Image (cartoon, grey):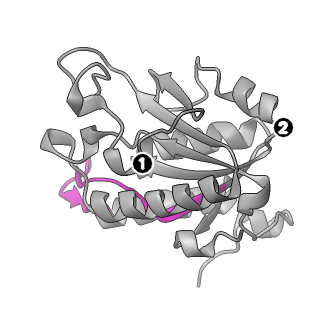
């Protein structure tokens, strides 16, 4: 039988934040993850889900923040090259904030917190890549800074990795385990963007 979550034990809300009082943060929705060595399992459906949420935030006139990871020339995270650009289906529009980061957490040595403070935002809807790295690190950092996080499960994705104790961890197992860890305390995790109220 599953144990109660720390959120349940401490009386934290089980409800996702609404679009009307949140900002959408799209983490590393870059070409990086659509092709080549870093291509993720389920990346295209996840991008479609992120695009649908993005359209809803835009229609509501709510803040949208795009995060890009930069790791330099010759890497899949070269933001000066086509591979490092934000995917066309979620490309920024004029007036939307774009923040470049160099660490897994979108808050580390960036002005994300300052941008959110300027907007008066305390609730975040998180989407993007990869589930177990930058989404995970950003949600944990945001929680520690006092933000209320909602992570949209099918708007994130990851890849199969070698298990250091033997064998492999399939992408879906790693994805679900990462989301489960977040849902214990750091975030409300919802299956779909359809679960985010207006």
Tag in front: 2 or 1: 1
Q: In which quadrant of the rendered view does residue 151 lie?
A: bottom right
Q: Give the residue drawn at x 65%, y 75%.
A: 3
Which of 138 and 76 lies nearest the eye of the viewer? 76
Residue 177, percent across and down? 45, 62
**Disc 2 to disc 1, how far (Cα)?**
24 Å
- Asked whether, in this view, residue 102 is left or right of residue 196, the answer is left
Closer to the chain start, of discs 2 and 1, is: 1
Q: Give the residue drawn at x 23%, y 48%.
A: 34
Residue 120 disc label: 2
Q: Give the residue drawn at x 33%, y 43%.
A: 87
Q: Which residue is mark 1?
A: 90
- Reply above or below: 153 against 69: below
Is residue 137 a member of the stretch shown in magenta?
Answer: no
- Residue farthest along the left direction in this orientation: 36
Q: Give the residue drawn at x 58%, y 35%.
A: 96
User: How many labels, in total?
Assistant: 2
Residue 115, percent across and down? 71, 28
Q: Is residue 11 visible?
A: yes
At numbered mark 2, what does the secondary structure look like: helix, strand or loop?
Answer: loop
Is residue 164 a member of the stretch shown in magenta?
Answer: yes
- Asked whether, in this view, residue 92 is left or right of residue 150, the answer is left
The answer to whether the residue labelled 2 contacts the one labelled 1, judged by CB atoms less than 8 Å apart, is no
Residue 134, percent across and down? 46, 40
What span is in magenta?
150-171
Residue 35, percent across and down? 16, 45
Decide: few, some or many residues near mark 2? Use Cα within 10 Å; few <14, some 14-19, many ≥20.
few
């Amino acid at each position: 039988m599953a144990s109660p979550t720390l959120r349940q034990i401490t009386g934290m809300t089980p409800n996702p934040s609404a679009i009307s009082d949140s900002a959408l943060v799209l983490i590393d929705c870059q070409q990086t993850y659509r092709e080549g060595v870093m291509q993720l399992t389920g990346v295209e459906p996840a991008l479609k889900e992120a695009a649908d949420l993005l359209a809803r935030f835009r229609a509501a006139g709510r803040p949208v923040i795009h995060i890009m990871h930069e790791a330099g020339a010759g890497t899949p995270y070269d933001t000066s090259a086509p591979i490092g650009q934000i995917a066309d289906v979620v490309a920024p529009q004029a007036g939307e904030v774009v923040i470049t980061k160099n660490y897994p957490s979108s808050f580390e040595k960036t002005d994300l917190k300052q941008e959110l403070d300027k907007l008066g935002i305390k609730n975040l809807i998180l989407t993007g890549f990869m589930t177990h790295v930058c989404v995970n690190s950003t949600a944990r950092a945001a929680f520690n800074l006092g933000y209320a996080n909602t992570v949209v499960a099918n708007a994130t994705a990851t890849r199969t990795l070698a298990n250091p104790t033997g064998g492999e961890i399939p992408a879906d197992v790693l994805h679900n385990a990462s989301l489960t860890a977040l849902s214990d305390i750091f975030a409300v995790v919802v299956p779909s963007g359809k679960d985010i109220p207006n």
